[in-house]
């Protein structure tokens, strides 16, 4: 795919590298976010990587934006990335950067010591899944910083705006951060391979009742559901979840074995059923909030 226009639009929610989809009228205090499902691999990026077109997609949250697409018909907006996670990861601090990737020293404000950087999974990743190096050579510092200014910062400005508008309208805002995980992953300390993992940063990013409802609804559909282990939530969940202020954030990880062939990366017969179940999940979460948090919603009207 050819490179897209590099111009930063005046509105953070109108951008060629991501898309904000609004319902005709927002009727629910939910915002859905799919930051890792982007599939826009530009010619420049593909030329810079040592991986083939399938290998570079190994860290992608395949089709997660499409799985959650029905939520807009239920009355909730959705923000989705078009850029791939391997090119820029917005589920990180803005400057979690690996000095081994760059041809000159990074600015002093870069966080070069985080565990995510050490693992090759910083804001500009060094690795995809299976610890595979992405780039043929080193990047210029200017190129790395330009990605952050041109795409990362506007993306988060748009997400903040969506959450703030929702909070003002309803008196509460619930962010569902949508992800997927490898099929073979086991829950920490067990041999169970969960179908879903609900992450709330061990209770710090969302009210306990919301997390419990999410686990209960998914379990009621017959899925194996874990909570927080091994995925408790990334930067987005941690940064935007402020339950004491009525700002809640849950990270939902989906087992890819439910809906894609991990060798071909093509959807399987399970895709349609999973999409239907996720629409029901969203609807039941919305009903739970109306029934159990109705006083908060009424106070905002």
Image: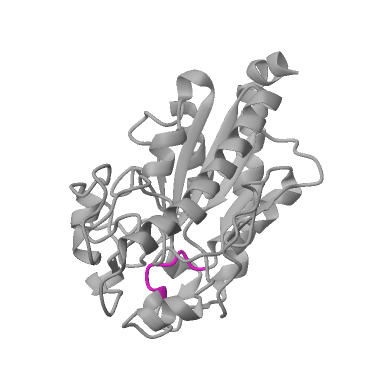
Image position of 212 (left or right of 77): left
Q: Looking at the image, can residue 195 be seen?
A: no
Image position of 234 (left or right of 191): right
Is 59 included in the stretch rendered in magenta? yes
Is 122 included in the stretch rendered in magenta? no
Q: Which segment did they paint magenta?
A: 57-62
**Residue 48: x, y in percent?**
36, 79
Residue drawn at the location 59% of the way across and 70% of the way down: 4
Residue 262, compared with residue 182, is above or below; it is below
Residue drawn at the location 54% of the way across and 22% of the way down: 246
Q: Who is closer to the viewer here, 113 or 72?
A: 113
Q: How is the image coloured?
A: one colour
Image position of 115 (left or right of 36): left
The number of numbered badges drawn on the structure is 0
Q: Who is closer to the viewer here, 284 or 137?
A: 137
**Residue 156: x, y in percent?**
51, 44
**Residue 99: x, y in percent?**
20, 58
Residue drawn at the location 45% of the way across and 32% of the way down: 241
Q: Main secondary structure of the magenta part?
A: loop
**Residue 163: x, y in percent?**
59, 35
Residue drawn at the location 43% of the way across and 69% of the way down: 257
Q: Who is closer to the viewer here, 18 or 209?
A: 18
| The residue positioned farthest toward the right in the image shown | 24
Looking at the rendered image, the quarter that the C terminus falls into is top right
Image position of 59 (left or right of 30): left
């Amino acid at each position: 795919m050819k490179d897209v226009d590099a111009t930063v639009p005046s509105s953070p929610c109108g951008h060629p590298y991501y898309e904000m989809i609004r319902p005709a009228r927002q009727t629910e205090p939910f915002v859905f976010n799919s930051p890792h499902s982007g599939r826009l691999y530009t010619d420049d990026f593909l030329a810079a990587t040592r991986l083939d077109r399938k290998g570079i997609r190994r860290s992608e949250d395949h089709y997660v934006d499409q799985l959650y697409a029905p939520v807009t018909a239920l009355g909730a907006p959705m923000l989705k990335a078009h850029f791939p996670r391997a090119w820029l990861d917005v589920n990180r601090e803005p400057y979690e950067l690996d000095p081994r990737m760059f041809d000159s020293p990074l600015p002093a404000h870069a966080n070069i010591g985080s565990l995510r950087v050490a693992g090759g999974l910083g804001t500009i990743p060094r690795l995809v899944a299976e610890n595979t190096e992405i780039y043929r050579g080193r990047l210029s510092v200017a190129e790395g910083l330009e990605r952050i200014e041109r795409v990362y910062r506007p993306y988060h400005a748009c997400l903040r705006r969506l959450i703030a508008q929702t909070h003002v309208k309803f008196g509460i805002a619930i962010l569902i951060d949508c992800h997927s995980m490898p099929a073979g992953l086991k829950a920490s300390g067990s041999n169970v391979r969960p179908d879903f993992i609900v992450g709330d940063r061990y209770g710090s990013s969302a009210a306990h009742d919301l997390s419990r409802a999410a686990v209960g609804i998914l379990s009621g559909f017959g899925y194996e559901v874990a909570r927080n282990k091994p995925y408790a939530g990334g930067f987005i969940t941690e940064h935007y979840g402020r339950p004491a202020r009525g700002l809640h954030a849950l990270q939902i990880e989906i087992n890819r074995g439910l809906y894609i062939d991990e060798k071909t990366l093509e959807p399987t017969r399970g895709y349609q059923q999973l999409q239907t179940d996720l629409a029901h999940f969203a609807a039941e979460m919305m009903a739970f909030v109306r029934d159990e948090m109705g006083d908060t919603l009424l106070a905002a009207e």
